[in-house]
């Protein structure tokens, strides 16, 4: 990776990945793009262009003009928003992806796009979900993610595009909040713990999902993209995870720092149904074996860091 184009650069992953990669690869070598502008270091701190990923021509122009050799395609709607607007999700998530893959094919770029635990469904084995298993998701987001994994493998097999991906669990971060996801409760709970000392969860007690702290997610992207291709048996996409948690466990970890923290519930049936269709925990051993994946943050360590950073 020498010159990198990032789509969706103002989103939850992009806003931190761009800054980290500019530190590693050089400020001018990471071209951030997004459909909007906001007050952000991503825009003021290096190259930035407005890009709607459904505009194939503009995406090609930007990539060609900057002579990029890598595309990190992050622009997408998350699960709950996609469920509310399924056609928009199909058009944006799949239209954006195929445009980005075409640019990668034409300009001979390496390619990364995230998949998700959302690529699994109710018939997938729920505990320690294997790397290779049943994928029959019941959400539009999941349909997009499975289709995306297949499409990326297709571009690799058919055209030789160096596509690589990760099935991310819920990502927890303090810099930019996520929007419209099912796992977002595990981010909101920390904000509310600091603001008001209590949180009302829309995901029910006892509902396990995998999570990962953003620093581990950023390292995983960079390490996978830098991995020796001859070691990769899989490509799209690798299971990765750091912890399997349910709301009470997160609350308990918060109480070690805020003893009076209160958690109650007002379950949202839509997001609860999505959560129940996803695994309780996933097995990341293929990622560990093929390119050395390892998460540094468990629930305790993440909670300590989240609360410290959010207090600032
Ligand atoms: N965090 C995502 C969501 O909840 C899952 O990939 O939609």
Image: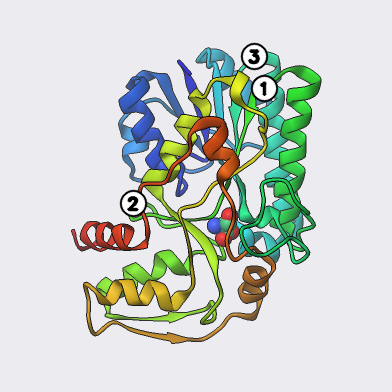
The Cα atoms of the two marked residues, 1 and 2, are separated by 30 Å
Q: Which residue reaches farthest left?
A: 312
> From where the camera sits, is residue 79 visible?
yes
Number of residues whose C-alpha sits closer than 10 Å to that of mark 1, classed few (under 14), some (14–19) or many (20 or more): many
> Which residue is rendered at x = 65% and y = 56% of the image?
129
The Cα atoms of the two marked residues, 1 and 3, are separated by 6 Å
Image marks 1 and 3: residues in contact by CB distance under 8 Å: yes
- Asked which quadrant contains residue 301, the reply is bottom left
Ligand 1: image quarter: bottom right
Would you say the beta carbon of the disc 2 residue lies within 8 angstroms of ligand 1?
no
The x, y position of residue 96, in whole percent, is 67, 38
The Cα atoms of the two marked residues, 3 and 2, are separated by 32 Å
> From where the camera sits, is residue 75 visible?
no
Residue 103 disc label: 1
Compared to residue 99, the image places residue 280 above or below, namely: below
Q: Which residue is mark 3?
A: 107
Number of residues whose C-alpha sits closer than 10 Å to that of mark 2, classed few (under 14), some (14–19) or many (20 or more): some
Residue 175 disc label: 2
The x, y position of residue 120, in whole percent, is 70, 57
- Asked which quadrant contains residue 158, the reply is top right
Viewer-proximal residue, 89 or 101? 101
The x, y position of residue 297, in whole percent, is 35, 52
Number of residues whose C-alpha sits closer than 10 Å to that of mark 3, classed few (under 14), some (14–19) or many (20 or more): some
Compared to residue 259, the image places residue 279 above or below, namely: above
The x, y position of residue 178, in whole percent, is 47, 57
């Amino acid at each position: 990776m020498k010159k990198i184009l990032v789509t969706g650069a103002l989103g939850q992953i992009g806003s931190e990945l761009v800054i980290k990669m500019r530190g590693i690869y050089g400020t001018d070598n990471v071209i951030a793009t997004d459909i909007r502008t906001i007050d952000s270091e991503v825009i003021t701190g290096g190259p930035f262009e407005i890009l709607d990923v459904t505009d194939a021509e503009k995406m090609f122009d930007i990539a060609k003009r900057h002579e990029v050799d890598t595309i990190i395609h992050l622009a997408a709607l998350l699960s709950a928003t996609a469920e509310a607007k399924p056609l928009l999700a199909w058009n944006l998530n799949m239209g954006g992806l195929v445009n980005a893959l075409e640019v990668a094919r034409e300009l001979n770029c390496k390619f990364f796009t995230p998949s998700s635990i959302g690529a699994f469904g109710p018939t997938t084995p729920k505990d320690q979900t294997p790397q290779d298993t049943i994928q029959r998701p019941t959400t539009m987001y999941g349909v997009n993610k499975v289709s995306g994994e297949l499409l990326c493998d297709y571009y690799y097999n058919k055209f030789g595009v160096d596509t690589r991906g990760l099935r991310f669990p819920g990502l927890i971060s303090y810099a930019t909040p996520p929007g419209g996801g099912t796992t977002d409760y595990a981010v909101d709970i920390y904000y509310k713990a600091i603001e008001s000392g209590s949180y009302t969860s829309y995901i029910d007690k006892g509902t396990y999902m995998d999570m990962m702290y953003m620093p581990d997610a950023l390292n995983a992207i960079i390490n996978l993209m830098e991995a020796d291709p001859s070691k990769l048996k899989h490509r799209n996409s690798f299971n990765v995870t750091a912890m399997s948690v349910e709301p009470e466990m997160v609350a308990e970890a918060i109480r070690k720092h805020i003893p009076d923290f209160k958690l109650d519930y007002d379950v949202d049936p839509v997001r609860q149904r999505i959560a129940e269709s996803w695994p309780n925990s996933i097995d990341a051993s293929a990622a560990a074996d093929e390119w050395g994946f390892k998460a540094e943050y468990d629930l305790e360590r993440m909670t300590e860091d989240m609360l410290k950073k959010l207090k600032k």
